[in-house]
Amino acid sequence: MATVDSEPKWYILHTYSGYEAMVKESLLRLIENNNLGDQITDVKIPTEQTIEEKANGKKKVVERKLLPCYVFIKMIYSNQLWYLVTNTRGVTGFCGPQGRPIPMKEDEIRKMRLEDYVADADFKAGDRVSIDSGPLEGFIGVIRELNNDSQRAKVSITMFGRNQEVEVDYVQMQKISETAVEIPAEEE
């Protein structure tokens, strides 16, 4: 009995440790080589920006995986695709009973930020914003550059006594009025 959905849904793949990027690349090649772009619509490894302190005392903003050993795939489920995906090198199987996938719920998709939901992104360069979620939550900065395709902005914030430019998702920030907050002048 072949089960086939009509609309793509998000599923979770379990991978060997450290194989996430290789699995993503292999799946993208599988999509291209077998012309599966209409059945597998997206493959993601959710990441977040964190601040790490290096051995020399310097602090640096780095991207790290939110869930190591997991890759998220948006696809129209069928037994044939299940077979192709689970036989990809590095994949141990889908997350679900007996390795059969269970589609993610809408709130899980939002929490993992697999799909961004920004209805009215009325940001522009020079706007002051507050960062409301993620590792930079609580910081206030000024937008330097916008990328509407990826829905990310380069924001200049003051961190560790110096100006630092960081990338922030639109969904993580909120525009604030000019009179709402006073940003201290830069110290050089």
Image: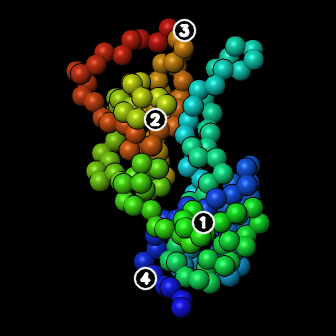
Q: How far apart are marks 4 and 3 (CA)?
A: 58 Å
Residue at the (54%, 9%) spot, across then down: 188
Left or right: 48 as drawn, with respect to 69: left
Residue at the (23%, 22%) spot, across then down: 180
Residue at the (28%, 50%) spot, across then down: 120
Q: Marks 2 and 3: CB-CB under 8 Å? A: no
Q: Tell me which numbered mark, 4 or 2, is placed earlier along the sequence.
A: 4
Indicate the position of residue 58 as horizontal and vertical percent values.
68, 17
In the picture shown, does residue 83 fall above or below 99? below
Q: Nearer the viewer's eye, disc 4 or disc 3?
A: 4
Q: How far apart are marks 1 and 2 (CA)?
A: 27 Å
Q: Can residue 73 be seen in this view?
A: no
Q: Name the residue under label 3.
A: 188
Q: Name the residue under label 4.
A: 6
Indicate the position of residue 36 as horizontal and vertical percent values.
60, 80
Amino acid type for the residue under numbered disc 4: Ser
Q: Is residue 178 visible?
A: yes
Mark 2: which secondary structure? loop
Q: Nearer the viewer's eye, disc 1 or disc 4?
A: 1
Q: Name the residue under label 1.
A: 94
Left or right: 8 as drawn, with respect to 65: left
